[in-house]
Image: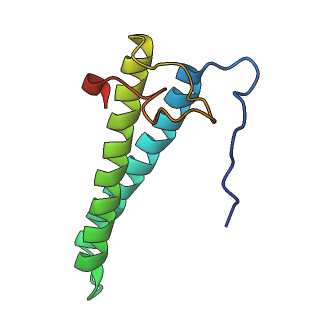
Amino acid sequence: MAEKETYEALPAGRSLEELIEAERANLMQVQGMARVLYDVLLYSDDDDGTMHADVADLIAKLVAESVDALEKIVRCFKAGEFGPPPNKGSGDADSGRMGRECA
């Protein structure tokens, strides 16, 4: 299994919005594949096909929720709803978080 890639800083030449949109596009592709897998498994001759189809359906639903959440983050980011990054030494737990309407 591939190691999860982490970013300490944004890749050069790409904005946060572009990175989020790229991840959104990847998630939508995964959602589409899970939907196709659901249909294939639902009508398979395998005794466990229906159970596996339910798992694929759940995967597609969870991915759809992630896509929606990323969309909301982009909208809130564009609207300026994000505050400054939290200070590591600060006792203020709410600094840097989204406004209530974006949470």
Q: Residue at x 57, y 25 (%)?
A: 85
Q: Residue at x 52, y 37 (%)?
A: 23
Q: Residue furthest front?
A: 91
Percent from the top left, x then y, of residue 95?
47, 27
Q: Horizontally, is 37 left or right of 87 in the view?
A: left
Q: Which quarter of the rendering shows the N terminus?
A: bottom right
Q: Which image quadrant for residue 16?
A: top right
Q: Residue at x 36, y 62 (%)?
A: 37
Q: Which image quadrant for residue 86?
A: top right
Quick one: 13 or 101, which is closer to the camera?
101
Percent from the top left, x then y, of residue 53?
28, 70
Quick one: 38 or 20, which is closer to the camera?
20
Count of numbered circles in the view:
0
Percent from the top left, x then y, of residue 102?
31, 26
Quick one: 21 or 87, which is closer to the camera?
87
Q: Residue at x 66, y 54 (%)?
A: 4
> Compared with residue 89, is residue 50 higher up or lower down, i.e. above or below?
below
> Compared with residue 83, is residue 39 higher up or lower down, i.e. above or below?
below
Q: Horizontally, is 7 left or right of 46 in the view?
A: right
